[in-house]
Amino acid sequence: MVRRGSIASAVVWMSILSLLLFWLPVLGPLIAGFVGGRKAGTVGNAIIAVFIPAVIAAVLLFFGATMLTGVPFFGALIGMGAFAVACIHVGPLLLGAIVGGAVGP
């Protein structure tokens, strides 16, 4: 049995479902992670697919906040706060991705 999966498709599915299910605090990211994990195909690919968007979002929020405030210190504070919120979101997303990657496509 050949297991096929794509990190890119898993990232897209996780991102879209996370945006659509934002109103479900824990269940939304869990569902998005499960679907993305199944799309990734393996547990390793699912874990990579979870952390790539989280890191990219944290970096973009840090630089965006710095540009909007014009003061790097305030941008760093806002960026750290956004990173903390992203970390809270990644927990259920990671759990769902591990389960979805273990179940497979």
Image: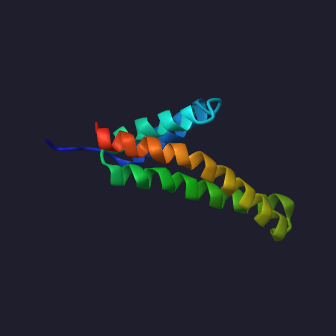
* 89 left or right, relative to 37: right
Residue in view at x 73 percent, y 60 percent: 79
**Colour option used:** rainbow
Instruction: Residue at 74% x, 56% y: name it.
Output: 81
Task: Give the image location of residue 69, x and y in percent.
Answer: 85, 60
The residue at 61%/30% (across/down) is: 24
Res 66 quadrant in image: bottom right
Is the C terminus in the top left, top right, bottom left or bottom right quadrant?
Answer: top left
86 in relation to 67, above or below: above
Q: How many marks?
A: 0
Q: Is residue 32 left or right of residue 67?
A: left
Instruction: Give how far across and how far down residue 71 sits, in percent.
Output: 86, 68
Q: Position of residue 49 (x, y in %)?
A: 44, 51
Say if 39 sits above or below 69 in the image: above
* Identity of the residue furthest to the left in this view: 1
In the picture, measured across the screen, residue 102 lies left or right of residue 97, that is left
Near-viewer residue (31 or 16):
31
Residue 12: image x %, image y %?
A: 47, 42
- Is 101 left, or right, of 84 in this rendering? left
Viewer-nearest residue: 30 or 8: 30
Observer-nearest residue: 80 or 70?
80
Q: Residue at x 82, y 58 (%)?
A: 68
Of residues 55 and 86, the one nearer the viewer is 86
Quarter of the image where the N terminus is located: top left
